[in-house]
């Protein structure tokens, strides 16, 4: 890209920013007047509204730092030569002359009452309204708009009990995958610093980590992603409302913004993509003193000594990077690690974390959290109880609850169109086309019953749904053999069945498990431990030794797993793995040389790499 193109791009970005600013002003109040304090007609219009006792927002352009640019963009937006530009309920009314005309005979009041407050008969405002602007909702809305459909997406973040909120993009971008992976990377760098001495680097003895600096850099990056999402909605001509959406009629939605401003919209079809929010324990002190993953990534101070409650993805990943940053971390486990995952792999993750300083308290749950001292962080007293009634009292600076997430489906008026949810879990059952029991209401992503809660799954389901609804596609989302990675200090990548599930589906005698430890070359020079990284494939003997389960515990396990997932989708067999020539020297080559079966009991211990 040469300098000229770059500056054009910069100009485009600035223009889009101004357009967003104008649209945000317009939608922030029922009546918005773009005006100048020096303009006579502007003053007259504002006086008129005062007389009529109509509340308005006056955007005084001449008082703004970017006033001249905003005025130029406003002209392009309205094509009105003169100020004021008056908007009522998002619609341009015009300038002084039009306002005076309308004020006669109480037409303004009528306009304020009528617009959008009542559904129009036999016609809808939108083809599709998407409730939830996260991974799935944004993907679906942009795809639907590509087919020329009129699409509205509503996104609203209810603050966490501690008041944390964030921008557009949903869980993954703001309080999930993105900040999690970046903090995981921050922790891995500490290990890299340690290793680097053996590679000849001279590192100061007292290398320090600064939580605030890390958090600020990550939040700045997230801010840029929020911005990009906003821009891409504009570019794709998707209308965006920063409001909480709920059904108030079978085809009507009410949107309420953070200032309480209410708008009503109608649509032919609806997509529920409202995701989930962290669950609380329901014990004294939990909402007052504990944090969740919703708070952790933007925490303005280092959490210090931390208790992580829970033992699944979120718990182990957060515990892993906090310990990797050098903090004192304890994980409180109610039953087992990583329920639903291959338990041999889950236990290996636990062992590795334990060997790297994470403490595990097994078969206990907290029953009371008390504050001993306020602060950033303060001091908390945690009382816990085991299944047999034994009590334990410990002190921590921070308690992070990672005990699962609840679907955001209970307060969005789903009973009005008659959408059925699972009353126990709040999840929405859908058919294989993501259609709920109400034919014109669809659902995708984390709100779905019995589906994987992963960003790429929500995105894929959303895109394919839009193509089926508005294009001529019939392709459905394939929820089978979805690869995933747990970003614990030693990453765990998996695709297909766990060993337990393979046994229960095909019978132990019908599966063959090939496995091996391996030692990444990069770990040899700094003398990092051998026989920790582990690879296993599970093959179905009666189906030509087709690979039905793939598991790897290694650095960059996610990068390794992604490619093998494509092969598994193509029906990969053990023979094909054996015929594949490895890339040397990389971790993934172990999968081309697996020869020891679990059944044989042969040694898989490695002496060198
Ligand atoms: P979300 O992304 O949650 O979006 C829903 C949006 O709807 C939110 O913005 C919400 O505020 C909004 N909303 C809710 N109710 C309303 C309403 N009534 N009106 C308007 N808006 C509303 N997945 C991975 O694939 N890889 C990972 O590494 C990974 N790491 C994760 C780490 C953590 C800590 C967590 C919590 C999750 C992680 N996930 C990961 C899961 C991933 O984030 C989710 O699967 C994904 O975000 C689901 O997308 P969604 O569109 O269903 O919902
Ligand atoms: P989860 O998978 O539902 O696990 C909840 C954990 O909390 C379990 O270990 C559970 O223990 C424990 N727990 C539940 N109630 C408890 C209680 N009252 N007291 C103590 N412990 C309790 O939830 P999650 O880890 O929040 O993950 C949610 C979803 O997000 C996952 O399904 C995943 O798809 C997605 N995610 C993905 C990634 C990734 O791709 N890397 C990362 C994070 C999250 P029991 O086993 O005893 O029930």
Image: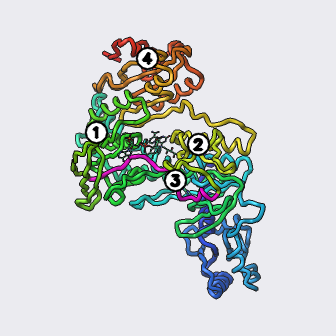
Marks 4 and 2, how far apart at CA: 33 Å
Q: Which one is earlier in the sequence, the residue at label 1 or at label 2?
A: 1
**Looking at the image, is mark 2 or mark 3 nearer the viewer?**
3
Q: Position of residue 391 (x, y in %)?
A: 22, 48
* Image quarter of the C terminus: top left
Numbered tag placed on residue 459 in the rendering: 2
Looking at the picture, how far across and down is residue 293, in whole percent?
40, 50
- Is 417 on the left or on the right of 401, as rendered? right
Label 2 Cα crowd, 10 Å radius (few <14 / some 14-19 / many 20+)? many
Answer few, some or many: residues within 10 Å of disc 4's Cα (few below 14, many 20 plus, some between 14 and 19).
Answer: many
Which residue corresponds to mark 1?
Answer: 362
Nearer to us in this view, 321 or 337: 337
Q: Is residue 244 above or below residue 594?
A: below
Label 4 with label 3: CB-CB less than 8 Å? no
Q: Please, is residue 492 above or below residue 58 in the view?
A: above
Left or right placement of residue 423 versus residue 129 in this view: left
Q: Secondary structure at mark 4?
A: strand
Instruction: Find the magenta span and give its range.
Output: 397-416
Q: Are marks 4 and 2 in contact (CB under 8 Å)?
A: no
Q: Residue at x 29, y 25 (%)?
A: 529
The one of 325 and 479 positioned closer to us in this rendering: 479
Mark carried by residue 408: 3
The residue beneath circle 4 is 514
> Mark 4 to mark 3: distance in Å?
42 Å
Which of the marked residues, 4 or 2, is nearer the chain's N terminus?
Answer: 2
Q: Return the disc, 3 or 1, that comes first in the chain's sequence.
A: 1
Residue 212 falls left or right of residue 454: left
Disc on the earlier residue, 4 or 1: 1
Residue 199 visible at all: yes
């Amino acid at each position: 890209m040469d300098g000229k193109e770059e500056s054009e791009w910069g100009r485009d970005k600035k223009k889009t920013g101004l357009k967003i600013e104008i649209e945000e002003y317009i939608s922030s109040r029922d009546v918005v007047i773009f005006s100048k304090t020096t303009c006579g007609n502007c003053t007259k219009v504002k006086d008129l509204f005062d007389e009529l006792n109509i509340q308005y927002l006056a955007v005084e352009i001449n008082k703004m730092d970017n006033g001249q640019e905003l005025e130029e963009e406003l002209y392009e937006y309205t094509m009105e030569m003169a100020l004021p530009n008056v908007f009522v309920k998002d619609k341009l009314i015009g300038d002084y002359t039009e306002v005076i005309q309308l004020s006669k005979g109480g037409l303004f009041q009528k306009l304020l009452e009528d617009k959008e407050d009542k559904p129009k008969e036999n016609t809808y405002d939108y083809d599709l309204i998407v409730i939830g602007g996260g991974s799935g909702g944004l993907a679906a809305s942009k795809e639907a708009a590509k087919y020329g459909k009129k699409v509205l997406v509503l996104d609203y973040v209810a603050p966490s009990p501690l008041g944390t909120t964030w921008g557009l993009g949903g869980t993954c971008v703001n309080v999930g995958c993105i900040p999690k992976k970046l903090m995981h990377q921050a922790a891995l760098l500490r290990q890299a610093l340690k290793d680097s001495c053996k590679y000849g680097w001279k590192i100061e003895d007292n290398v320090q980590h600064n939580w605030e600096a890390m958090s600020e850099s990550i939040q700045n990056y997230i801010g840029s992603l929020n911005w990009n999402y906003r821009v891409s909605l504009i570019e794709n001509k998707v209308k965006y409302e920063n409001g909480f959406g709920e059904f108030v009629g079978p085809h009507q939605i009410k949107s309420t913004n953070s200032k309480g401003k209410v708008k009503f919209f109608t649509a032919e079809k609806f997509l529920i993509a409202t995701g989930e929010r962290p669950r609380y324990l329901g014990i004294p002190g939990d909402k007052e003193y504990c944090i969740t993953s919703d708070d952790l990534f933007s925490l303005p101070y280092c959490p210090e000594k931390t208790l992580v409650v829970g033992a699944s993805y979120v718990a182990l990943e957060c515990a892993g990077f906090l310990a990797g940053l050098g903090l004192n971390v304890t994980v409180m486990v109610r039953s087992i690690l990583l329920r639903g995952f291959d338990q041999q792999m889950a236990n290996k993750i636990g062992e590795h974390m334990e060997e790297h300083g994470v403490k595990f308290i097994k078969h206990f749950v907290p029953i009371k959290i008390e504050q001993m001292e306020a602060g950033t962080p303060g001091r908390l007293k945690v009382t816990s109880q085991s299944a047999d009634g034994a009590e334990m009292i410990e002190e921590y600076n921070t308690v992070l609850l990672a005990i699962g997430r609840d679907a955001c489906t209970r307060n969005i008026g789903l009973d009005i169109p008659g959408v059925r949810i699972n009353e126990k879990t709040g999840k929405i059952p859908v058919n294989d086309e993501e259609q709920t029991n109400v034919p014109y209401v669809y659902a995708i992503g984390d709100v779905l019953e019995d589906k994987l809660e992963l960003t790429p799954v929500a995105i894929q389901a959303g895109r394919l749904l839009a193509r089926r609804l508005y294009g001529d596609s019939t392709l459905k989302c394939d929820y089978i053999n979805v690869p995933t990675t747990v970003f614990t200090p030693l990453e765990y990548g998996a695709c297909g069945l766990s060993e337990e599930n393979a046994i229960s589906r095909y019978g132990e005698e019908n599966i063959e498990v090939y496995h091996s430890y391996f030692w990444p070359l990069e770990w040899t020079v700094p003398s990092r431990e051998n026989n920790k990284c582990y690879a296993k494939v599970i093959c179905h003997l009666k189906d030509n030794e087709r690979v039905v389960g793939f598991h790897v515990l290694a650095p960059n396990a996610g990068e390794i797993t992604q490619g093998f997932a494509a092969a598994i989708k193509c029906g990969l067999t053990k023979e094909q793995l054996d015929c594949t020539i490895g890339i040397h020297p990389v971790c993934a080559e172990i999968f081309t040389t697996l020869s020891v079966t679990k059944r044989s009991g042969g040694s898989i211990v490695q002496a060198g790499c």
